[in-house]
Image (cartoon, rainbow, N blue to C red):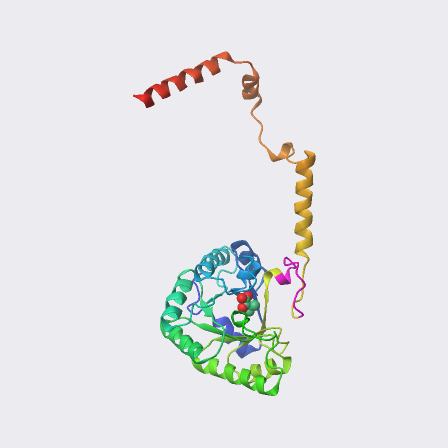
Amino acid sequence: MLASPFPLQVLRDAKRNGARLAMISLYDAPTATLCCDAGVDIILVGDSLGNVILGHDNTIPVTVEDVVRHTGAVWRGVRASSRAQVPIIADLPFGAYATIESATQNGAALLRAGAHGLKLEGAGPAHLQAVEALLQMGAPVMGHIGFTPQSALRFGGVVQGKTARDAARLLHEAHALQAAGCCAIVLEAVPVEVAARITRELEIPTIGIGAGAGCDGQVLVWHDLTGLNPAPPFRFVKRYADAHALLSQAARDFAADVHAGAFPAAEHGWAMAESEREEWEQPNAELGTRSAESERKTSKLQSE
Ligand code: KIV
């Protein structure tokens, strides 16, 4: 099958048809294959990989190289799935779009790794310029406003837009990102009324996380929605499985089996053919002599 000339067509179609988009933030090949096969519409290689995969306290330490590596893995996973056309958005991490030059250079690295679009956080004048420069380079851009984890050091709390004034600022930012050419906007941790109004007013889709059902789509982090992350989740997370309990049990069972000598069993290994085993088990002086002789020859050759 030929790849679509515009992989992010799914965004335009969803806004036009009113179909709701399911996006998951994930970071590796097998999970990408699983999620594509399961019917997810878009994959985000989020810089949340800093917390979720690399064990950092926030997303600030994530580098472009980190996101490039995981984008490549996700691309291979999508390609191996039954829905190889599922688009991948890659996050430009903290500091990667501070200047137009760094935005285009780092954006190009992520597209080369397999991303079909890029996401960046914020809607200030420098962000809008970065969006325009990336678009000129040929990279679709998804905006991200509301709670933007890369600026968490600056924020006083998680939920943004709780006052009428702050909500108006978010609405203004959403319009500015659309005007700059964004193909969609993530709305994170904003009151449902604010997200619903932004969604109504925009011609591009909104994808919410903690922004209510009024958005055009929803995104969650894989480790949150599967319960792989055992930390108490934010209230906007719905856990669809308890993967942590399941996998902990598997690890406990493996360790107990090894300690008890119950693993591996006969079926987990290979046995010799009977005739070979009989020969092998005979006290065979000739075999031993031959190998000792060949060792002597080898060491003589090496010393010559
Ligand atoms: O990094 C990430 O996974 C994200 C989503 C939570 C939107 O930005």
Q: Which residues are magenta?
A: 224-235
Question: In percent of the image, x 68 and y 57: which residue is there?
Answer: 242
Q: Residue furthest top?
A: 285
Q: Nearer the viewer, residue 58 or 181?
A: 58
Depth order, front residue of 72/276: 72
State ligand 1's quadrant. bottom right
Residue 203 x %, y %: 51, 82
Q: Is residue 197 left or right of residue 69?
A: right
Q: Where does the image place residue 303, in percent across and percent down from the top left?
A: 32, 22
The answer to whether residue 286 is visible is: yes
- Residue 100: where, in percent of width, then height? 37, 73
Was residue 228 drawn as part of the magenta stretch in this picture?
A: yes
Q: How many marks?
A: 0
Q: Is most of the magenta stretch helix, strand or loop?
A: loop
Screen quadrant of the C terminus: top left
* Image location (x, y in percent) of residue 44: 52, 65
Q: Going by the image, does 117 lie left or right of 21?
A: left
Asked if 283 appears above or below 30 in the picture, the reply is: above
Residue closest to the eye, 293 or 76: 293
The reply to whether residue 41 is visible in this rendering is: no
Q: Residue at x 50, y 12 (%)?
A: 285
> Is the residue 210 above or below the residue 171 in the image?
above
Residue placed at 57% from the left, 77% from the top? 18
The structure residue drawn at horizontal position 53% and vertical position 61%, both measured from the top left corner, is: 50
Q: Is residue 141 magenta?
A: no
Quadrant in which the N terminus appears: bottom left
